[in-house]
Image (cartoon, rainbow, N blue to C red):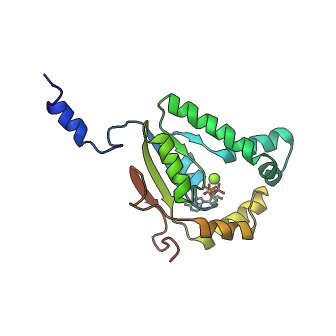
Amino acid sequence: MDTKNGPASRIISSVKPGENKNPVAFVLVGLPGSGKSTWARNHPRRLAIASSDHYIRQIAVSEGLAYKEAFEQHNKKSFSLMKERVKSLVRDGKSFIWDQVNLTRKKRASIYGLLHRTHRVVFVVFLTPPEICWQRNLERNEREGQGIDRQRFEMLVKLLTVPDETEPHDRIIRVGHATWHDKT
Ligand SMILES: Nc1ncnc2c1ncn2[C@@H]1O[C@H](COP(=O)(O)OP(=O)(O)OP(=O)(O)O)[C@@H](O)[C@H]1O
Ligand SMILES: [Mg+2]
């Protein structure tokens, strides 16, 4: 029988925070066009996806707006809808994918703070070189009228800090292009 100081408590105290939690939150990190949503859609576990972009698209359709207009007018609303979705996934103990750019340590620290008690927080970093991301944005803009402008894109490139071992996380996975690392 396990007592207070018996084998079970020794095992529990030796488990690092995050290792004994079942559901996983894959928190995506990457520039626009780096391939986050494509990765999320193709995940073999067909996990739920929380994405503010999803709500922008919904609003655009329901209000007959272009994507860009919907983004400019309903950014806040899309974030709060996404927050509600995350809350309900957490409440239900579901594994899920958090699909936003999540470029800064500050943003990721707040996500980790929100999720680490209930989920293993896995950062999935898309190391697609900025020039390739930009090209994809141009192509997407032609196809769907969705692209961001160059100035904003450059601002996001500057903002990106690739997660490393020094920030709170349970695991970091790097995806793609080994030739491009952070701002080197
Ligand atoms: N591994 C890949 N190889 C080639 N093209 C890709 C790859 N992943 C995504 N793409 C293409 O790049 C474009 C952008 O991909 P995606 O929408 O997944 O990017 P994103 O990171 O979600 O961007 P955003 O932050 O703007 O939502 C799409 O047209 C997609 O088809
Ligand atoms: Mg996307």
Q: In the orientation shown, which residue stands out farthest toward the right?
A: 64
Residue 119 or 142: which is nearer the viewer? 119
Residue 8 or 3: which is nearer the viewer? 3
- The residue at the point 77 percent across, 55 percent down is 144
- The residue at the point 85 percent across, 47 percent down is 65
How far across and how far down the image is residue 98, in percent? 55, 46
Q: In the orientation shown, which residue stands out farthest toward the bottom?
A: 184
How far across and how far down the image is residue 177, in percent? 49, 68
Q: Look at the picture and state if 139 lies above or below 16.
A: below
Q: In the orientation shown, which residue stands out farthest toward the front?
A: 4
The answer to whether 163 appears left or right of 19 in the picture is right
Q: Quadrant of the N terminus?
A: top left
Can residue 43 be seen at all in this image of the molecule?
Answer: no
How far across and how far down the image is residue 94, in percent? 48, 33
Q: Look at the picture and state if 49 lies above or below 164.
A: above
Residue 19 or 30: which is nearer the viewer? 19
The answer to whether 58 appears left or right of 94 in the picture is right
Counting labels gives: 0
The answer to whether 172 appears left or right of 102 in the picture is left
Can residue 35 be seen at all in this image of the molecule?
Answer: yes
